[in-house]
Amino acid sequence: MNEASNRYSAISIAMHWMMFLLIVAVYACIELREIYPKGSDPREALKMWHFMLGLCVGILVWVRLFFMVRGQKPAIVPTPPRWQHLLSKAVHGLLYLLMIALPILGWCMLSAAGKPIPFFGLELPALINENKELSKSIKEIHATAGTVGYYLIGLHAVAGLFHHYVMRDNTLIRMLPNCKK
């Protein structure tokens, strides 16, 4: 195989790492808000950035899916056992599900709470009618799914490192920019 066929495309690699940085920023905003008192300007700003960056994830995941469907997936060499392939598909599927569902849940949560949905100077329309009890339920689901995201992202990262350092295959190299084996 030549170098081009055993690596993801430059756009796929760029999208992967851009989404990684964006998701880190989303999580950082919601975690860092805790160091400020409720109602304070910094806390409210971090929440607003969490909402806006989360919506960016919700938009860009569709762009990423488009390129994923149109692009070629380079083979892992040497081929891993079937159980690893199935586990990888499951984790990736759940990560994509979270990248789609969490922004929608967040938007619905704000809508049901009767709060504005900020998006870089715009105010997006509510997706559902105001319902404070529903907002609380959605918030719990959103928070739980966000926690699951930590574990899935961790598993994804550990798997990449495991494949690179233990299995010694090209799993990680395929997604790193400008790397040669």
Image (cartoon, rainbow, N blue to C red):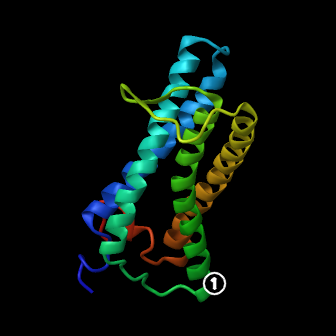
User: In this view of the protein, which residue sits in the foreground, 114 or 138?
Assistant: 114
Q: Quadrant of residue 29?
A: top right
Q: Quadrant of residue 86?
A: bottom right
Q: In terms of secondary structure, where does tag 1 sit?
A: helix
Most extreme residue toward the top is 40
> How far from the left and from the top, in percent, is residue 71?
30, 74
Label 1, on which residue? 83
Q: Residue at x 62, y 52 (%)?
A: 149
> How far from the left and from the top, in percent, is residue 124?
43, 34
> How far from the left and from the top, in percent, is residue 98?
57, 55
Classify the position of the C terminus by image quarter. bottom left
Query: What type is the residue that disc 1 sits on?
Result: Trp
Q: Residue at x 72, y 31 (%)?
A: 132
Q: Is residue 53 visible?
A: yes
Q: Is residue 117 left or right of residue 74?
A: right
Q: Residue at x 53, y 41 (%)?
A: 127
Q: Is residue 21 visible?
A: no
> How far from the left and from the top, in percent, is residue 162?
57, 69
